[in-house]
Amino acid sequence: MKRRVAGKVLWSIVLLGVGGFIIYGYLPQPIEVETVTPTVGAIAITVDDDGETRIRERYVLSAPVTGKMLRVELHAGDPVTAGETEIARIQPSDLSLLDARSRAEAQARVRVAVAAYGQASTTVQRAKEALKLAEQDFERAVKLRKSNAMAQAEYDAAENRLRLAMADVRSAESAQRVAQYEIDQAEATVRYIKATYDPNDDNFFTIVSPFTGKVLEVHREDSCIVASGTAIASIGDPSDLELVIDVLSTDAVKVCSGDTVIIEHWGGEEPLDGVVRIVEPSAFLKISALGVEEKRVNVIVDFADPFQDRDSLGDGFRVEAKIIVDETSPESLSVPTGTLFRQGEAWQVYRIVEGVAELATVEVGKTNGLRTEILSGITKSDRLILHPTESIQTGVQVVAKD
């Protein structure tokens, strides 16, 4: 009798255990989800695109007269000094120099060169006046910043304006020196023409560098007959680089002079800083890699870092740039964009409350694609579900992944 009772009890326990496992298997299980929490801090709104470096002032030296040019001994990368380094030597052709047409052309080139010099001088004067004003603004900004009467952003803007004004003066003075060089070359040609030509005299017309820098490219190296205006060599200063970023015209309207630029993937370990100098007023047509026609606009950027921090960068190097066109408040709340989804006209998120998913409607602000500003609807202590699937509904039990 006791055995029979014990057997029934044992079987009852087994059946209850099996039934419990079956029931547990049919019960809804918590869904594993990835979770994040909102963060407090400013987010930068950027326009991202590829860019290319280029030397700010690139000078192409050409033959001022027609004649036989001797072999050019310079090579790309060789240093040149203004007024000292010989670029090329040309033996003028007597026929091209002695006819009346050539004399008229040479005299016209002198007048053009003088006019260009006058224009360059005006540009220098205007750039110096702008620099003087920028220096006064910066001095005022330094005093106000010391007394905490000016925001850091306004101080940085004044400093950037000063840096840009100094660069404009250097550029204008370089253009003025080149204009003077053009006058000297044109007047030398006139002197050659006015002189009595002696076929037994091996006089050569010497082209001297008007600029201190380096040879960027030699267009004609071998000895040959060259026509007047033939490009011989290009020179420039590799330390005076600027950055050209071609952005979509729809993005270009958001970019302004003075905007900060973050330059990445240029080859160095740390990103570089830059400042937008100008947004070109005219767009151009470009065919994308997918064959789509795009209207693009060049954005010209000045480097803010000293040359020593980027001395490995050269002319025509590719970089990736982020132009900061807007920024949220340092006290703003933001979440990864992957937590948000649209329901009709409203933006919503799922937050976890006591192990259960709960739907919350939020008001969104600015976004940079990766993070989005939240104006209302959640708090910084909420735990949100990242990339919610269709299986996530209000009231569903969830558990965070390890």
Image (cartoon, rainbow, N blue to C red):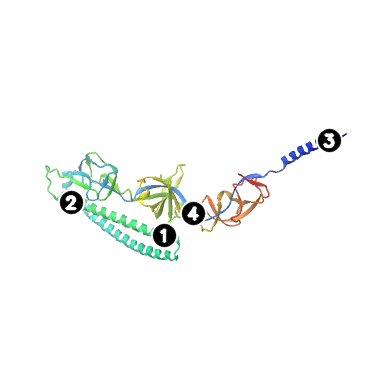
Q: Is residue 34 left or right of residue 234?
A: right
Considering every residue shown, the one lying at the far front of the view is: 2
Q: Which mark is residue 190?
A: 2
Q: Is residue 335 left or right of residue 272?
A: right
Q: Earlier in the sequence, mark 3 or mark 4?
A: 3
CA separation, marks 2 and 1? 50 Å
Q: Are marks 4 and 2 in contact (CB under 8 Å)?
A: no
**Is label 4 or label 2 in front?**
4
**Is label 3 or label 1 in front?**
3
CA separation, marks 3 and 4? 74 Å
- Which of these two is toward me, 199 or 339? 339
- Which of these two is toward me, 272 or 200? 272
**Is label 2 or label 3 in front?**
3
Q: Which mark is residue 44?
A: 4
Residue bearing the label numbered 3: 6
CA separation, marks 2 and 3? 128 Å
Instruction: Say if residue 108 shows up in the picture.
Output: no
CA separation, marks 4 and 1? 17 Å
Q: Earlier in the sequence, mark 2 or mark 1?
A: 1
